[in-house]
């Protein structure tokens, strides 16, 4: 059977009772050891977004832009339970692509988001719940429709966690958490581009676990113990360090690895990636209408004969994410460009190993390489948005049967995509 980096056929393992007991026990132990003596706030972590003084501190879901969340969410003042905020997204997409893999379609339409977000972001006890339907459009891999993606990945409750913030600079979260890894988020509306990129295919997205967040001056640290690629095994550890150089520049270093070896293989838990080490270096620069974000990634899968990795293999790659947002004064021929933005992503990734030495397939066959370009013109008016997208992927040194097209022998794939929706 042909296997692809993040698409393994199987039954998704749901987090068992033992996993949640371990998570909650860990959270209770850490919180019991804290001295709760100051008025808590939501401490900074990997998903933090800056809020204006007139906007409640809504930190989830994280959004890289150009799409902006509703600045006036539905708010419920529940007295001693604090303020609860409700937001959400509904969007649909249409897609055309060439060199289609078996089971995929050259044209399709789908409801790619129908989600609601409920959160409490102030006080000692906070929480976040994300519920609904979604798909995960992914560059260079077959599209899985929402009707199948929910069961194949993270269920109708893809993210949900509690958070305790006993001090201004420390917090602990436990539950179904967004990953610390990579520069792109999980869902289409969160990112500059509709489709996630080639580097994202080596990364996890959602994990069950516990995360500690600590900030001191310009340095933000996070440490997580979790189940990696949603494997239902609490064997992964990773950490991140983000240094804010100034208001325009930040640098992040992220690392993670599986402390043991597992043979779990599902759509959400790719066999080889769930046994890897992964490292990111991410730089972000903002200047007026420009956002510039280059990042570099290295992954390593050791030799594990029990899972079919007869030789070690690695990937190394880089991406450049660019975004230009037109201001309210910009116009062409008297037509205002306010609300328009132009995100662009360029990527290159290479893998090591060969079929001859029994290395695992991490891309389009052992030792294959790929590059991509994705352009996503975007327009948002208040809570309404629409995005067009063109993407192109080319792979080299591929293994027959593991690339594009009905026989897996084509080396390129182009896509045109249109997404429109509402952020309420």
Image: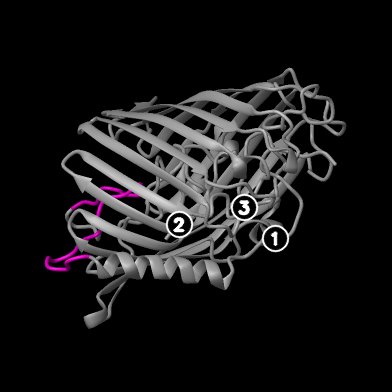
At 49% from the left and 28% from the top, the residue drawn is 297
The numbered disc on residue 177 is 2
The numbered disc on residue 305 is none
Pointer 1: what residue?
147
Tally of numbered tags: 3
Pointer 3: what residue?
135
Q: Is residue 263 magenta?
A: no
C-alpha span from label 2 to label 3: 18 Å
Q: Earlier in the sequence, mark 1 or mark 2?
A: 1
Nearer the camera: disc 1 or disc 2: 2
For the stretch drawn in magenta, the main secondary structure is loop
Q: Earlier in the sequence, mark 2 or mark 3?
A: 3
Q: Is residue 46 magenta?
A: yes
145 and 122: which is toward the camera: 122
Question: Which residues, given as a range, are shown in magenta?
Answer: 34-52
Tag 3 secondary structure: loop
Q: Where is residue 313, by image quadrant?
A: top right
Q: In the rendering, at what x and y percent does residue 106 appear? A: 78, 39
C-alpha span from label 1 to label 2: 23 Å
258 and 123: which is toward the camera: 258
Instruction: Name the quadrant of the N terminus.
Output: top right
Q: In the rendering, at what x and y percent does residue 152 appear? A: 68, 57
Residue at the farthest bottom position: 79
In the image, is 49 to the left or to the right of 168? right
In the image, is 420 to the left or to the right of 354? left
Q: Where is residue 374, by image quadrant?
A: top right
Tag 1 secondary structure: helix
Q: In the rendering, at what x and y percent does residue 228 appear? A: 54, 50
Nearer the camera: disc 2 or disc 3: 2
Q: Is residue 3 above or below residue 128?
A: above
């Amino acid at each position: 059977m042909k296997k692809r980096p993040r698409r393994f056929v199987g039954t998704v393992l749901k987090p068992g009772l033992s996993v949640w007991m371990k998570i909650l026990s860990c959270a209770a132990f850490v919180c019991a050891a804290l001295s709760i003596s100051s008025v808590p706030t939501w401490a900074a972590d990997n998903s933090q977004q800056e809020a204006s003084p007139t906007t409640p501190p809504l930190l989830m879901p994280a959004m890289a832009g150009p799409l902006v969340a509703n600045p006036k969410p539905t708010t419920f003042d529940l007295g001693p339970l604090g303020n609860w905020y409700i937001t959400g997204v509904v969007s649909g997409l249409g897609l055309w692509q060439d060199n289609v893999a078996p089971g995929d379609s050259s044209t399709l339409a789908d409801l790619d988001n129908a989600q609601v977000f409920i959160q409490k972001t102030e006080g000692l006890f906070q929480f976040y719940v994300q519920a609904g339907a979604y798909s995960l459009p992914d560059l260079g891999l077959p599209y899985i429709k929402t009707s199948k993606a929910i069961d194949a990945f993270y269920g109708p409750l893809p993210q949900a966690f509690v958070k305790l913030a006993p001090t201004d600079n420390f917090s602990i979260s436990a539950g179904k958490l967004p990953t610390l890894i990579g520069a792109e988020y999980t869902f289409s509306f969160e990112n500059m581009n509709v489709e996630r990129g080639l580097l994202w295919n080596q990364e996890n997205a959602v994990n069950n676990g516990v995360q500690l967040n600590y900030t001191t001056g310009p340095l933000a640290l996070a440490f997580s113990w979790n189940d990696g690629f949603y494997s239902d095994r609490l064997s992964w550890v990773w950490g991140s360090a983000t240094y804010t150089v100034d208001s325009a520049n930040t640098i992040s270093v992220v690392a993670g690895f599986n402390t043991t070896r597992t043979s779990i293989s599902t759509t959400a838990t790719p066999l080889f990636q769930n046994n890897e080490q992964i490292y990111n270096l991410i730089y972000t620069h903002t200047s007026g209408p420009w956002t510039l974000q280059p990042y570099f990634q290295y992954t390593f899968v050791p030799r594990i004969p029990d899972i079919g990795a007869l030789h070690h293999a690695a990937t190394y790659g880089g991406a450049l994410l660019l975004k230009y947002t037109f201001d309210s004064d910009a116009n062409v021929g008297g037509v205002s460009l306010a609300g328009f933005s132009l995100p662009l992503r360029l990527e290159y990734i290479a893998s090591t190993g060969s079929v001859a030495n029994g290395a695992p397939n991490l891309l389009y066959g052992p030792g294959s390489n790929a590059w991509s370009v994705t352009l996503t013109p975007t327009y948002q008016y208040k809570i309404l948005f629409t995005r067009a997208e063109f993407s192109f992927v080319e792979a080299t040194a591929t293994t027959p049967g593991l690339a594009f097209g009905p026989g897996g022998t084509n080396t390129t794939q182009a896509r045109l995509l249109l997404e429109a929706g509402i952020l309420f």
